[in-house]
Amino acid sequence: MDYEEVIGTIGGCGLYQKLMLAFLFSSTIMDGLQIGSMVFMVPDLDYRCAVPGYNNDTYKIQSEIHEELINEYIPKSEDEGEVVYDKCLIYSSTTENGNRTTQKCSSWVYDKTNTHTSITSELNLVCDDAILAKHAFTFFFLGYLFAMVVCGILSDRFGRKKVIIVSLFLQGSTGIATAFISNIYAIYVLRFLTAIGGAGSFVPSVVFASEVSSVDSRMKSSIVIQVVFAVGLMITSLLTYFVRTWKPVVIIISVPSLVLGVAYVCFLDESPRWLLNKKRTKDANLILSNIAKLNKTVLPQTEIVNISSSNNKKVEIWKMFTIPQLLKRTLIFILNWVIVSLVYYGLTLNVGKLYGNLYMNFFFDFGCRASGPCSVHPSVKSCWKKKFAY
């Protein structure tokens, strides 16, 4: 009897799966929190040059005297009927004929409507250094890309549980460390590692969920993890609405990863399928017996013995390019994921540019994305699913 039949016999969508997936997918919320926090940690801010010698200068005009000082020192222009003060230049002197010269300013004041402090404002990543703020996103998603490729391989070699736990500890520790760093290049490294931790827990979790679920219920588990991920992003908007300084936010969203890591060490099972592939039949049988017990089903001893005879034949990855139908499907999936990722994260990282309240836009945007996967389920199960897929 092969592994899929055994999972179906002992309950592929029973109490064990529901509890385990709820426990397992809690780490996915942490991943969503870390990605969503980038929008508020390194935001696009409105700013202008600070008035020289005016220590209480703010972006918002305080009084007529304050406005006069701003007009005296900061060049201005009009944009669609609104006065816009220069972001990077300040008047350096006034000549006898009334002509003014300008120079680059070295201090700025920021609009604090949405965020009181951020990496952008604390490190002054504006004007000539504005590109450094964009690089923070680049390094974060490079870490995500690296983990997507590497962590699947590592989880096949060392186990789903170990990779998930190590990734959670990496995500939590580097996330907390970010709050105590004031160097943008060090922040790049830490964000890169944090992203590895996030994706490193996400990828094996998806695989783990499919391996302890029956074939019929795997689609549901895949949908749930996408919903949970979007919920994590929604929580980010609520958290940053009430806590508008970036350092407490990054600590708050990172500490739970460490707590989950400890909890997983104590309570998370290893994937029985992975154990069987590694010839650890005794350990796999023990976990399968526990699954059957919690699901109130019975796993006969004959099935436990025979399960190790499931097909473990290894196939080189390049073989997929030699089978036309498999190659076709692989290329379609790759194209789909490229398009989905560009649109999904493009909207995520640029939601601050939408008109209206940043926090409401962010919350309702991902509220829609949380409901989206649920609407996909009926259509995929319909008789037209092959036409939609191919």
Image (cartoon, rainbow, N blue to C red):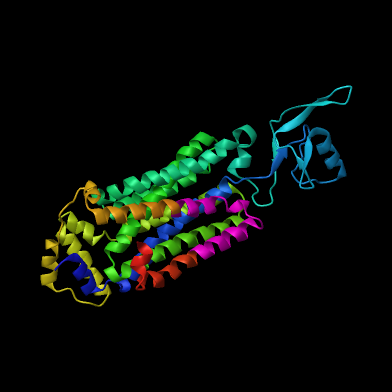
Residue at 58 percent across and 42 percent down: it is: 119
Q: Is residue 137 left or right of residue 302?
A: right
On whether residue 372 falls in the magenta region, the answer is: no
Image quadrant where one finds the N terminus: bottom left
Q: Is residue 349 left or right of residue 58?
A: left
| Residue range of the region highlighted in magenta in the rendering | 340-369
Residue 168 appears anywhere in the view? no
Q: Nearer the viewer, residue 131 or 330?
A: 330
Residue under the point 59% across and 55% down: 240
Quadrant where the C terminus sits is bottom left
Q: Position of residue 333 (x, y in %)?
A: 35, 55
Q: Position of residue 156 (x, y in %)?
A: 25, 51
349 is higher (above) or lower (below) than 21: above
Q: Residue furthest top?
A: 96
Tell me, yes or no, whether the highlighted magenta stretch contains residue 362.
yes
Q: How many marks?
A: 0
Judged from this view, the residue extending furthest toward the right is: 97
Q: Quadrant of residue 6?
A: bottom left
Q: Is 139 in front, or is 163? A: 139
Residue 284 relative to residue 57: left or right: left
- Magenta span: chief secondary structure: helix
Where residue 179 appears, as percent x and y from the top left, is 53, 44
Visible residue check, residue 15: yes
361 left or right, relative to 390: right
Q: Is residue 310 above or below residue 125?
A: below
Q: Position of residue 142 (x, y in %)?
A: 43, 42
Of 26 and 204, the residue lying toward us:
204
